[in-house]
Image (spheres, rainbow, N blue to C red):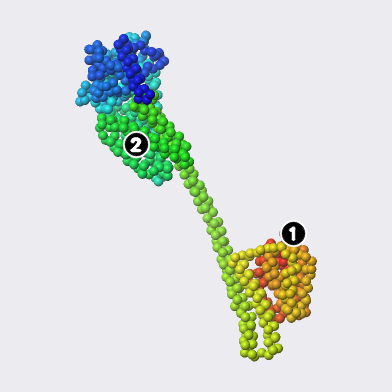
Amino acid sequence: MTNFALKHLFLIVSLLTASFNYATQAVIPIPVNLSNDLLLLDNPYWKLYYGKTYEEVLKSNFEGGQACEVPGSWGSTGNKEMGFGTYICKLSKKDLAKLNLSFKLYAIGTNYQLYINGNLEASAGRFGKIETESKPDFVPTDVHFNSNSDTVEIALQVSNYNYRQGGIWYAPSLGLSSIIDENTNIEVITAAFLCGSLFVLFFYFVAFYYIRTKEKSSLYFALLCLFAALRIGSTGIILFRQISACFPWEIIVRIEFTSLVLIIIFGMLYLYSMYPRDLNRKMVKGVVWLQAIFAVVFALGPVVFTSYLIPSYLFICALMLLYLLNLVIKVLMNKRPFANWVGGAYLITFLAGFNDIIHSQGFINFMYLLPFSIFLFSVIQALTITRLFSNSFKEVEQLSDSLKMVNQNQSSIIVERTALLKEQASELHESNLIKDKVFSIIAHDLRAPIKSLSTVLNWVADDDLTYEELKKSLASISKNVDTLNLTLENLLNWSRSQLTGVKSEPEIFDLRKPVQELMDLYKIQLAEKNINLQNLILDRVVVYFDKNQLQLILRNLVSNAIKFTHHGGKITMSIAPSEKSGFIKVCVEDSGLGMNQEAINKVFSAVEHYTTFGTNNEKGTGLGLLLCKEYVEGSGGSIGIESELNKGTKVWFEVKQEA
């Protein structure tokens, strides 16, 4: 069975019960202890005399009454919504005359006059049998009275010509004055607290917005809080009416309707500003424009017209709540920042909103939860935005501290950068010197032997040489070619190392093989100067080194030794233990010219171009030892010179033994 069918079945049962009560007795016993409880005066306690004033009902001796729906409208029993009528309730209780009672009324549609035991006790607006005589107003009130007997008769004379529904919209209550006053005070304090808190949040987040106008979320949330406060103040206990009686009825109704629309508008904009990637911009824009049209209509249109739009608008609100629920689920699934907070707060508002929509249509009679849910939603969102701003301020503080540290260290940074610039300038100067050295070698040390070779070849071409002179010239050419070859190889390898760094491919091999190949290579040069090259590396010595680099090192060292050794001199190749673990020393020692300490310091310099002539005026580039140093140190070893002027030179370098 549907909710609609259940609702009407319940109504029929209630009406039949009420009719039975009125048919059998005019007075209904009060079923509760009024000293402790309140009596909610709903359907069974009232009888409606539609189209009659209280005076006319009394004259007719209460004839013509009908069962009615309280809370609800008299249109639910087939009466016209625009009209007037009288609700009458007769109650009895033993010792009722001894109690100080109060009758609690909420908003009545849309004006009333309250009679208790025939006396006019309260009114709201102006009761009239025709529209021109009637004036609407909402005045929730508590009426204190003492019954002179154990029976009390309550009559509400109501007229409505300004709203889509007329009648008693909220069930009145009867109870002790102390209990009624206490409940009323709680309701007023609660509504005041909710409104006041929301107004505080409004001003607080407006201030946030002016601090950072780029963050629209704080502005939208501030306006959401403002209209939520207006909504709470214009419904229920109608706090605005409690504060001042100057609020016109139409203004209160317009605020009630319009604030609901604006809550949805700024709630949507707030959600979009927080999660723009998850909401469709066109959809949000369309919803906002649609809601804005409703807001204008509710704010400016006649209440009698706009009240008829409320049921349709509540249906749209239900669809909006479902749409927003879908968006919140999407935000949660995407794990956006603060999604749990926003989603939890919205879920509470979603459930409360549906409760109030169903309640307003009469399907349930629980209570309105939206004011509390809006407040809770606002508090949670306020905490969310505050935390968001707190994180932003924390980032600003961190950046500020970093900037402060930079400013404090600026002088030291300038000093460091100045030192770095000086170092780079020094490196640039050194690079220029190296460049000059390379060009000097190319200009002199390479050009001279090539020119000498060219001259001899021209002589041979002109047939100006005898056979003996030719043999002698060929020997000179051979020497120049060997020198030129080593010079070119040194130059190319050294230049490559300056551009790309020293690259080695070490391998394991026996040191005796490259030494023997070296002795065969320099056999002619040794014979020309009658130099004895003694090889003391006779046993197997396994080393871990780049073979090509080792061959070039040995060639340079032996070539230098031959160049600076006199005729009949001696060169010795040997190995010796090294102080460094895992290494041995390879030594090349000659009995030649030797050098002083100043010369030793210069031969390994990349900047100073140091070279001297050999015993037969041999010319060198000065690059050989520099290249040897780079190769040896690149493999983790060391190279050194031990020499004394005119007593010979010993050059040693370290190589790794078998890895």
- Identified at 59% across, 78% down, the residue is 443
- Identified at 64% across, 80% down, the residue is 449
* Front-most of residues 177 and 261: 261
- How would you rate the neighbour count of disc 1 (Cα within 10 Å): few for under 14, some for 14-19, many for 20 or more? few
Identify which amino acid the numbered label 2 is placed on. Leu
Identify which amino acid the numbered label 1 is placed on. Ser
* Front-most of residues 327 and 231: 327
Q: Quadrant of the C terminus?
A: bottom right
Percent coordinates x, y for residue 626 in the rendering: 66, 69
The answer, for residue 604, to whether it is visible in the render is: no
598 relative to 345, above or below: below
Per the rendering, the mark at residue 222 is: none
Label 2 sits on a secondary structure element that is helix
Give the quadrant of residue 454: bottom right
Give the quadrant of residue 44: top left
Circle 2 is placed at which residue position? Answer: 262
Give the quadrant of residue 475: bottom right
The answer, for residue 80, to whether it is visible in the render is: yes
- Identified at 38% across, 44% down, the residue is 281
Alpha-carbon span between mark 1 and mark 2: 85 Å
* Front-most of residues 98 and 263: 263
Q: Which of marks 1 and 2 is nearer the N terminus?
A: 2
Circle 1 is placed at which residue position? Answer: 581
242 relative to 178, above or below: below
641 relative to 41, above or below: below
